[in-house]
């Protein structure tokens, strides 16, 4: 029996409860829900750090951020880091990574420079939608160049300051010359639906799958959404009526919120939910491609996120410390063919993002490296379990 393929689908800043399969009746995630129905839903998964870079490198190396010496943002991941693709390479795996990786600080560098490969055979990195001259803009320049001026979601504050201090204008058409303001609410995408960052990640992933005449493979697809700002095609915004959101689900005392604050919450939830629905649509395209190529029964699929989002809880937005459930707890879905039953199983035990790499090595029959610090979501008669 040949070794299984691996497909890892990641979002950025997705709360554990922003998923229909985790009991959220307001959000529309039919494709992720069908992925949950075909495997195991770990509904108490916690990341090792509630911000992007340390969480991402911990996830792909199976080591704690403190061990790696990367415990906060802005610390470049060493090019020689022992990542999952390097752990799998000696067993014949061909690997690709498309979209957000965020192993390097991105506000103060030229994204046209060659990126360290971190063990991937193919790498097309784009850490922010349309903000830098990177793989995403190169893809649009090739496929639909008239859309280039509609891609940028606005300059992040640190990038804005770097360009001003270094006198390094980028020539990119941004929505404003000022620093962008995140968390304001839903913003319609200005271009075609087919050229969003999520569409780019799905297109490159599908292209990779279509070219894999040799197997096994590892593919990592890094979606930027639902990270703010919530710039989303109108058709996904139209899935929701912000006035219908039930604020009674909000954990704060509603009596302390002004009408303006309540309106802001509804607008933010609108953009956040719509961004997740767009990702869900493109994940559906990827799953359909796997099915069309008869790869579903030979591919392990993992869906998760690097951390969550406060989304207005306790008046907070974004992520960081303290690592409450809203920012430290994330979705984790694992579809692992050939492990027995387990279809549609929910595991309520506490697991860590750190456990995914050891689990994948277990499922592929690759020797565990002694430095790995996670446990394993092990095989059992009922499928993948804690």
Image (cartoon, rainbow, N blue to C red):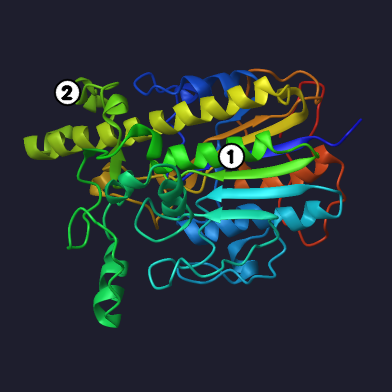
**Foreground: disc 1 or disc 2:** 1
Residue at disc 2, secondary structure: helix
Number of the label disc, if any, that sits on residue 205: 1
Q: Which residue lies furthest to the bottom in this view?
A: 166
Residue pointed to by mark 2: 243
Viewport quadrant of the N terminus = top right
Q: Which residue lies furthest to the right in this view?
A: 1
Q: Can residue 234 be seen in this view?
A: yes
Circles 1 and 2, Cβ within 8 Å, touching? The answer is no
Q: Can residue 350 be seen in this view?
A: no
Name the quadrant containing residue 295.
Answer: top right
Residue at disc 1, secondary structure: helix
Q: What is the x, y in percent for residue 126?
A: 47, 54
Answer few, some or many: residues within 10 Å of disc 2's Cα (few below 14, many 20 plus, some between 14 and 19): few
Q: Which residue is drawn at 45% across and 66% down?
A: 111
Q: What is the x, y in percent for residue 362?
A: 82, 42
Q: 248 or 317, which is in the foreground?
A: 317
Gap between marks 1 and 2, in whole Å? 36 Å
User: Viewed as shown, does residue 325 lie left or right of 66?
Assistant: left
Viewport quadrant of the C terminus = top right
Q: What is the x, y in percent for residue 18?
A: 41, 31
Q: Which residue is drawn at 24% across and 40% down?
A: 190
Decide which of tag 1 and tag 2 comes sooner along the chain. 1
User: Viewed as shown, does residue 268 lie left or right of 221?
Assistant: left
On screen, 295 above or below 75? Answer: above
Q: 73 or 286, which is in the foreground?
A: 286
């Amino acid at each position: 029996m040949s070794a299984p393929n691996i497909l890892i689908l990641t979002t950025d800043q997705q709360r554990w409860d922003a998923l229909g399969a985790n009991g959220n009746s307001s959000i529309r995630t039919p494709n992720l829900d069908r992925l949950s129905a075909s495997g195991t839903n770990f509904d108490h998964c916690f990341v090792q750090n509630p911000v992007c870079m340390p969480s991402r490198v911990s996830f792909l190396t199976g080591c704690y951020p403190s061990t790696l010496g990367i415990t906060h943002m802005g610390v470049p991941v060493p090019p020689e880091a022992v990542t999952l693709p390097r752990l799998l390479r000696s067993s014949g795996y061909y690997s690709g990574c498309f979209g957000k990786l965020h192993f390097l600080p991105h506000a103060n560098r030229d994204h046209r420079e060659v990126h360290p490969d971190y063990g991937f055979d193919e790498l097309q990195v784009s850490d922010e939608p349309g903000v830098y001259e990177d793989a995403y803009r190169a893809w649009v320049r090739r496929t639909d160049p008239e859309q280039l001026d509609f891609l940028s979601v606005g300059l992040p504050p640190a990038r804005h300051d770097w360009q001003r201090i270094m006198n390094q204008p980028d020539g990119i058409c941004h929505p404003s010359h000022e620093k962008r303001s995140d968390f304001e609410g839903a913003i319609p995408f200005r271009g075609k639906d087919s050229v969003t960052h999520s569409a780019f990640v799905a297109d490159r992933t599908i292209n990779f799958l279509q070219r894999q005449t040799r197997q096994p493979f590892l593919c990592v697809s890094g979606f930027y959404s639902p990270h703010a700002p919530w710039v989303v095609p109108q058709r996904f915004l139209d899935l929701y009526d912000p006035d219908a959101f039930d604020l009674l689900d909000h954990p704060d005392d509603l009596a302390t919120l002004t009408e303006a604050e309540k309106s802001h919450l509804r607008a933010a939830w609108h953009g956040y939910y719509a961004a997740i629905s767009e990702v869900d649509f493109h994940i559906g395209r990827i799953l359909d491609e796997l099915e069309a190529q008869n790869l579903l029964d030979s591919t392990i699929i993992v869906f998760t996120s690097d951390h969550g989002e406060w989304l207005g809880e306790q008046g907070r937005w974004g992520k960081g410390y303290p690592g409450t459930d809203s920012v430290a707890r994330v979705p984790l879905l694992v579809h692992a063919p050939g492990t027995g039953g387990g279809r549609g199983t929910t595991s309520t035990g506490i697991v860590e993002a750190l456990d995914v790499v050891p689990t994948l090595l277990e499922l592929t029959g690759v020797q565990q490296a002694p430095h790995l610090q996670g446990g394993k979501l092990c095989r059992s008669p009922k499928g993948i379990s804690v």
